[in-house]
Amino acid sequence: MKTAFKIFLLLAVVGYLVYVIYNFSAKAEDRVCEGINVEIIDSIPDGFITGDYVRSVLTRNKISPVGMKISDVNLEQIERVMLEESHIESASCYYNAAGRLCIKVVPQQPVLHVINQKGEDYYLSSTGLTMPTADFNVDLCVATGDVSKKFASEHLLELARFIHDDLFWSEQIEQIHVVSPDQIELYPRVGQHVIELGSVDDFREKFNRLRTFYREGLERVGWNKYRKISLAYDGQVVCTKANNKKN
């Protein structure tokens, strides 16, 4: 008897679920998009991509779904259009229970602002893509001088990511100036010295030397004692005093 009752109860539950799913599906065909929710997964405090920007992409491409039947909205098309934007790394779309289109966007993360001697002005993303700077203002380390797009993506990207991701260096290094591939200069925010990096080869070891010199040297003698600090020589930190005498 108990077994029969359990079977009856199970069949009743299954029947109810089938009824609910069928009716919900039927009604869903006639539901319209009630609005758009945008979620930006961005590590930049001030925001690089905004909800208004995402909505403007829909408007610009004439695919805003508000008021349309949900069944007529092509979510894959919306995702594809979002991914065509150079500022967006990934995008996904779905509808919530209230009938609102939810768009989740992960922006490209700019790590370097390039302004080269040819007048080219763009951001370099953490994945090596170039991004236009129009309508966006991000406080980043700036690369100047003889910087082609190929040199920036192949030789400065790893250095830029290192500076960007390190709390101390992101606050200290404000400019990378490329004189030539083997002659790169860094300009700090604190101190009136120029840092001669040499090439980007072994830059992590060079920055370790510089951090040690900052901690054990400049903090004792003062940040403006030297006009030049060279890291170009293996295992050494060679300084030129502000009065042009070598130390």
Image: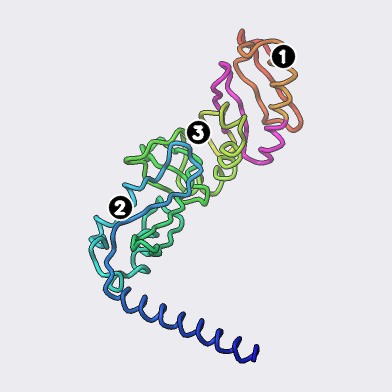
Amino acid under disc 1 = Asn
Find numbered disc 1 in the image and state the secondary structure of the residue it sits on: loop
Amino acid under disc 3 = Cys
Residue 64: image tag: none
Per the rendered image, the range of residues in magenta is: 184-208
Where does label 2 land, which residue?
55
x 67%, y 31%: residue: 232
Mark 3 or 2: the one toward you: 2
Q: Image quadrant for the C terminus?
A: top right
Amino acid under disc 2 = Arg
Q: Left of 69 or right of it: where is 196? A: right
Q: Is residue 104 above or below residue 160?
A: below
x 54%, y 49%: residue: 154
Q: In front here: 200 or 65? A: 65
Where does label 1 land, which residue?
247
- Where residue 100 appears, x then y in whole percent? 34, 60
Q: Residues within 10 Å of mark 3 (few under 14, many from 20)?
A: many
Q: Is residue 205 above or below residue 216?
A: below
Tell me the distance, in whole angstroms, between the alpha carbons under discs 3 and 1: 29 Å
Where does label 3 land, which residue?
141
Q: Residues within 10 Å of mark 1 (few under 14, many from 20)?
A: few
Marks 3,2: beta carbons within 8 A: no
Which comes before the other along the chain, label 1 or label 2?
A: 2
- Where residue 61 appears, x then y in whole percent? 25, 59
Q: In front here: 215 or 150? A: 215
Mark 3 or 1: the one toward you: 3
Find numbered disc 3 in the image and state the secondary structure of the residue it sits on: loop
Q: Image quadrant for the N terminus?
A: bottom right
Quadrant assignment, res 207: top right
Tell me the distance, in whole angstroms, between the alpha carbons under discs 1 and 2: 59 Å
- Where residue 30 appears, x then y in whole percent? 26, 73
